[in-house]
Image: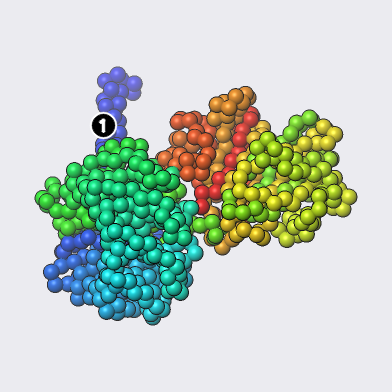
Amino acid sequence: MPGHPALLRLLALAAGLFTQRLAAQEGSLQWALTLQGWSVSSPAVSPDGATIYVGVETRTAGRLVAVAADGSVRWSILRPDGISASPAVGADGTIYAGCYDGKLYAINPANGAIRWQYDAGSFIVSSPAIAADGTVYFGAGDGRLHAVDARGALRWTFQTGDWVESSPALGPDGTVYFGSRDRAFYAIAPDGREKWRFASAGAVTGSPALGADGTIYFGSADQRMYALFPDGRKRWDHFTNGDIQASPVLGADGAVYFAALDASFYALEPDSGALRWRVPLNTNSVSTAAVRSDGAVVVGGDDGIVRALNPADGSVRWLFDTRKAVPDDTIDSSPLLAPDGSVYFSSLDGRLYKLRGNGLGLSEVSNWPAFRGDARRSGRSLFGAGLGRLLNLSVRAPVGARETLITGFVVQGAAAKAYLVRGVGPGLEGFGVVGYMPDPRLDLYAGATRIGGNDNWEDAPPGLSVSDTAAAVGAFPLLPGSRDAAIVVALSPGAYSAHLRAVDDAGGVTLFEAYDAIGGDPISRFINLSLRGRAGEGDSTLISGVVVGGTGLVNLLLRAVGPGLRLFGVDGVLERPRISFYNGATLVKTNEGWSGVPNAADLAGAARASGAFPLGAGSADAALTVVVPPGPYTIHVAGVDGVAGEVLTEVYVLR
């Protein structure tokens, strides 16, 4: 009967057991498919996440198998020799796979039909990398790196001193990075010219990982993990006690994860190579790890066990032992974290396994969270300072009488470059804004040092023209005779703040803007914008804008910090901020309470990687990450439940 104590206890017990079963499901077996052969191939996933592709070897032949998420075989194609290289999947779904028969195959995802094949003349165990223009790069047993166009025609080859097992990785500028058994690591331009080579003391068989800042990481048989600058100079190396055949992967904060043949798994600091932690696996491993968006690091071992390690200390979160089915077989395959969170891997026991995940896929913040960079194994870095950039940062806000609006921004680069900075009051009248600040004054600071300023824009100091620069960057023109403030100033890399106040202390609505003037150092760019102001709901929503330019994607970390401001002595904070990111009128993403989301580890890692101060665990501060193409966007910060207060809005460029 309803409300009966015994019944309620029974229901509570059942709910508890069900919750325990749900918690125990992560890392448990969903299915295992017999492949009729053995596999060292790392699975790849189709663009829609619905199909898994894996290579298979037998004593007399090889196969590429397409498997549905329920474990059923969609199709399987037979080849004259084994396929140990991991397949790669193009943006259009085409599968590229190298074979021991010396051929690279381009395969139709619908039915497994071969669209074309390219004969390299020697065995292929190097997984292909797929460039944005469709060019496919891979190494072969002839000691060459091969470049083949999207139709299967040879573009060029590059000769090394030994066979190339290393799978190439493509930088954002198209540079091809790979190693060879000749003990060298190479950087090759997209046209086949050698840019540089780096000598190690051992064969380089693994694939490199590419950092967001351009750092290249790779391991060698000389027992060292190397980090190189983009120009080939050594940044650091870290000595282990074993050959490194597994490829490194990167955490959300840039941590370098890899297994070595000293039966250990390592986590290194990205900037220095210092040891963050090292844990014994009690087995060797050539499996490349995968980093999940909650920070878990999943890796296979020669003992037939897949482990999920905690990013903080390497302790085991969960493990799955394949030896319960077939004793004493190894896992060379690198785990695939599918978009739905499922974990796939193959084994020398002849099976493709699917384990239950927790609904989370690869880290969305890390530049290289998995073997070949992503779940499609494309081998390509999607982000880079030379591709996408912030062109404009702006915020419109009311400024009280005798108050100052303070905004901060950070410039990154190698040399000083021109930026346009404006404080607009009267210029807002043309947009229907009432109560605008009649006479704003703008002062620019580097730390506590004032480096420039302006009261009326036509009285700007000699140098680059304010009006010409505004026209060049697409800013709306300021009217002749208006008392808006503006200045064009050369800024070296560093942190700056702009102070905007009314000359007559009257206050009013004002618009702060900072524009990248584009010319000069091409690497120089905005990487951070911050604004502290009062926000509530409705008309009290604090709105800022960013314009993304360039030719590629930009990964942004956005934060609305309310409770976190108490650490800095701020009173009257916004207790529960909500941050929302818009493309025009379309809501892209929103968050309330950063630590309550499943990918909180990604958000914490993004903060560490960008240099942002950490948010308290369990705090009601808001944060989210977005990957966006060029275009204009707005950021809305509001109070939940109509409550208002002080809040810090922050935008960080992660890529």
Q: From the viewer's perspective, is 620 left or right of 224?
A: right
x 32%, y 59%: residue: 200
x 68%, y 35%: residue: 448
Q: From the viewer's perspective, is 430 left or right of 531?
A: right
Q: From the viewer's perspective, is 278 left or right of 152?
A: left
Measuring from the top left, give residue 277's x and y in whole percent. Answer: 32, 39
Colouring chosen for the image of the structure: rainbow
- Label 1, residues with CA under 10 Å away: few <14, some 14-19, many ≥20: few
**Residue 447 quadrant:** top right
Residue 278 seen: yes
Q: From the viewer's perspective, is 580 left or right of 6?
A: right
Q: Amino acid at mark 1?
A: Leu
Residue 293 seen: no
Total labels drawn: 1
**Residue 376 quadrant:** bottom left
Measuring from the top left, give residue 33's x and y in whole percent. Answer: 20, 57
Mark 1 — residue? Answer: 17
User: Can you name the residue that lies furthest to the left here?
Assistant: 327
User: Can you name the residue that lies furthest to the right here?
Assistant: 481
Measuring from the top left, give residue 367's x and y in whole percent. Answer: 43, 53
Nearer to us in this view, 7 or 575: 575
**Callout 1 secondary element:** helix
x 33%, y 52%: residue: 225
Q: In the figure, 315 relative to 116: above or below? A: above
